[in-house]
Image (tube, coloured by chain):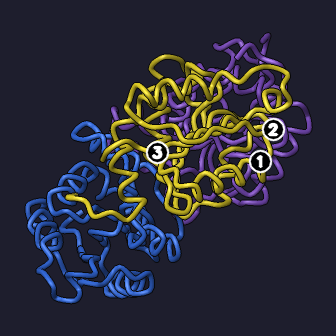
Chain colours: A yellow, B purple, C blue
Amino acid sequence: MNSLLVGIVAVSDRAAQGIYADEGGPALTRKCKEFGWSVQAEAIVPDDRERIQSAIRAFAAQGCELILTTGGTGIAARDVTPEAIRGIMRIEIPGFGELMRAESYKLTPNGILSRSLAAVVDSSLVVALPGKPQGAVDCLTIVAGAIPHAVKLCRGQPTSC
Amino acid sequence: MNSLLVGIVAVSDRAAQGIYADEGGPALTRKCKEFGWSVQAEAIVPDDRERIQSAIRAFAAQGCELILTTGGTGIAARDVTPEAIRGIMRIEIPGFGELMRAESYKLTPNGILSRSLAAVVDSSLVVALPGKPQGAVDCLTIVAGAIPHAVKLCRGQPTSC
Amino acid sequence: MNSLLVGIVAVSDRAAQGIYADEGGPALTRKCKEFGWSVQAEAIVPDDRERIQSAIRAFAAQGCELILTTGGTGIAARDVTPEAIRGIMRIEIPGFGELMRAESYKLTPNGILSRSLAAVVDSSLVVALPGKPQGAVDCLTIVAGAIPHAVKLCRGQPTSC
């Protein structure tokens, strides 16, 4: 695989309203560049199921092979990113969330409160990361090793595995 | 957080019929006191979906911030506690079950047979623990570190995280 | 428990068409014999939801206490074994998939891409394993310690636990 084409969706009511600047999206963009991946598209949307779904589908249609979201994976009433993704996915890939939680737990017991997940939407891999910039980058790093192969499978490319 | 307000629901056909005394509920009550939590309400119900749901909802309405169940999380036909909770929850919090199983597995391979889980019902945190008193106390201890923060989020309280 | 009665279902479009010989089924058969289990029935079916379901139900009706499938647990569009099993199961047992992924991850980051799972169908335990022969055998070995007790519970036999 050469450079992976990435879209990043920051999910936050307050950032979408301009109350403060989103930091999760830029932090993920920097990390993707470190991995040699190419960030093609970025968006900030409120914690709204349909707005999240529209952004993901638009990025998939634009050819983003990997779509990262940051925010809305907690357990508060406003956190609806998992439900948004489950509403449009073909399948969930449970190992991403399991691994992110198991590794985060080593840093803090509250790591088990995250509902981070990965799923296949259209032919794109979607990985939903926490909202805090450091948490988002840490969780992306935890699962990064499986992303290139997952993207190939999502796009229906033949693989040696 | 000061003292957490706790409700405990023992789920057991035989204990509900008075065939033997429930030991899971009292064991959890003792453990909660050790943690400095305040047990406000206790109930024993049979392995019946609606009876389990009614007990949880009643305790939530009474102001229990944390509701612990013990029993009915196995894989036998009578074990319906997970289905009862899923029928009334807003969201499941998958990391609780994952962590309880991963830690229990270190003690016995049969630890992976547990369907223990946590969920948010109304604005209470519900944690479903195994039926054996020692297993229930062990599993509660495994996840206890994440409970205070989870309860705050369930109640919509502002947090520093 | 004396000898466990086992059925094995190899799920593969190409093996079902005779394009190549299935190797996953024979590899699992050899491993079951090592465990002292008795393989009663074997089948090869295409990656088709209804064909997978029919094979599992037929083996359950024949008295197979444990039904192993190999193949169709990945994330490609043709991988439908998890959906086939979920369509006929009474309950899923999440700890099997969690443990298989956590242990596979230690060998390769791509281990988290597996959607391996276990479920109770009728009164049989069904464990869905990866398609590669070595992966199937490795994953079976990872969870083998919990299988005898799980089978007893599925069949409604009284146990000391």
Q: Nearer the viewer, residue A33 or B73?
A: A33
Q: Position of residue A104 (x, y in %)?
A: 49, 25
Provide the residue designation for mark 1: B90
Quadrant where the C terminus of chain A is found in the figure: bottom left
Residue type beneath disc 1: Arg
Label ID, residue C156: none
Q: Position of residue C30 (x, y in %)?
A: 8, 67
Provide the residue designation for mark 2: A77
Residue type beneath disc 2: Ala
Residue type beneath disc 3: Leu
Provide the residue designation for mark 3: A5
Q: Nearer the viewer, residue B29 or B82?
A: B82
Question: Comparing marks 1 and 2, which lies closer to the viewer?
Answer: 2
Q: Nearer the viewer, residue A15 or C129?
A: A15
Residue C52 position by quadrant: bottom left
Question: Comparing marks 3 and 1, which lies closer to the viewer?
Answer: 3
Rendered view: C117 above or below A51: below
Contact, CB < 8 Å: mark 1 with mark 2? yes
Q: Nearer the viewer, residue B145 or B14?
A: B145
Rendered view: C44 above or below B160: below
- SS class of the residue under badge 2? loop
Labels 3 and 2: the sequence-earlier one: 3
Q: Are marks 3 and 1 on the same chain?
A: no
Q: Are marks 1 and 2 on the same chain?
A: no
Please state the chain letter of the residue tagged with numbered disc 1 in the rendered image.
Answer: B
Q: Position of residue C124 (x, y in %)?
A: 39, 72
Instruction: Check disc 1: other Cα within 10 Å, few if <14, some if 14-19, many if 20+.
Output: some
| 3D distance between C-alphas at marks 3 and 1 | 35 Å
Residue at x-position 52% and y-position 47%: A118
Please state the chain letter of the residue tagged with numbered disc 3 in the rendered image.
Answer: A
